[in-house]
Amino acid sequence: MGRRSADFCYLTVMKIRSILLSALFTCCAFLMVTYTACTKDKCDDVVCQNNGTCVDGSCKCPFGYSGTNCEIVTDPCVKVHCKNEGVCENGACKCPPGFEGELCEQLSITKYFGVWMGKDSCSKGSYDVDSLVISSSPVSGKSAKISNPVGLGQQYSVTGELTKANVITIPGQSVATGITLSGSITFSSANSMNFSYKISGFTSDSCSGTYSK
């Protein structure tokens, strides 16, 4: 009976221990839940705009923004993304020569492409030109191919580059056997221009022509 009594006591103690440990774990879990509920994240109800970040209940704003929720734009250029090396100034893109548009996304020279008609007034006389063609050039996005200069024919051409918003500059180059041409085309609009050039070689002349398309 002594041994059975000891075993009974041991089992009783173990059961009580198990009950106490279970109760302890339950209390700890309850306390953790209660603590978590009482220590609410300060950023739970904070909504930061424009990629702002909440830190300890307050919005930390990126460059160009301010305000409680980063809702105030302090830099007018922060949302303006100019293309083709354009630069934003006071909220608007300033485009380099050869580009235009709200974001400098358009090639300026393309509006001048087409068939032009005009008359060249030269030091040696006047000449009608009924099909001076300005088209794209593979040289660059700011370059243009000018076909039939001086009225030589469509098989003859020179290449120029847009050096200002309305000026195509043509450096000296061979346009036909024994003839070199240089000059510039100045546009007063997309449909009106003046072509000034000089030719040299076996013949020399200076000309200025007014054209439209």
Image (cartoon, rainbow, N blue to C red):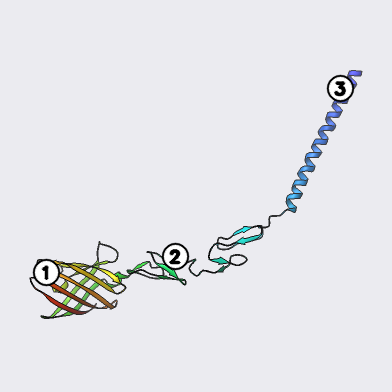
The answer for how far apart the CA atoms under marks 1 and 3 are is 123 Å
Amino acid type at circle 2 is His
Amino acid type of disc 1? Answer: Ile
Question: In what element is the residue under mark 2?
Answer: loop
Report how far apart the C-alphas of labels 3 and 2 lie in the structure: 83 Å
**Vertical side of 39 occupied by 2: above or below:** above
Q: Is residue 99 left or right of residue 172?
A: right
Q: Nearer the viewer, residue 155 or 59?
A: 59
Are dots 1 and 2 in contact, CB under 8 Å?
Answer: no
Question: Residue at image x 28%, y 69%?
Answer: 162
The residue singled out by tag 1 in the image is: 179
Q: Quadrant of residue 9?
A: top right
Q: Which residue is mark 3?
A: 7
Density class for disc 1 (Cα within 10 Å; few <14, some 14-19, many ≥20) is some
For the residue labelled by badge 1, is the local secondary structure a helix, a strand or a loop? strand
Residue at position x 24%, y 64% in the image: 137
Find residue 138 and report its image quarter.
bottom left
Say if mark 1 contacts mark 3, CB within 8 Å.
no
Q: Amino acid at mark 3?
A: Asp
Q: Secondary structure at mark 3?
A: helix
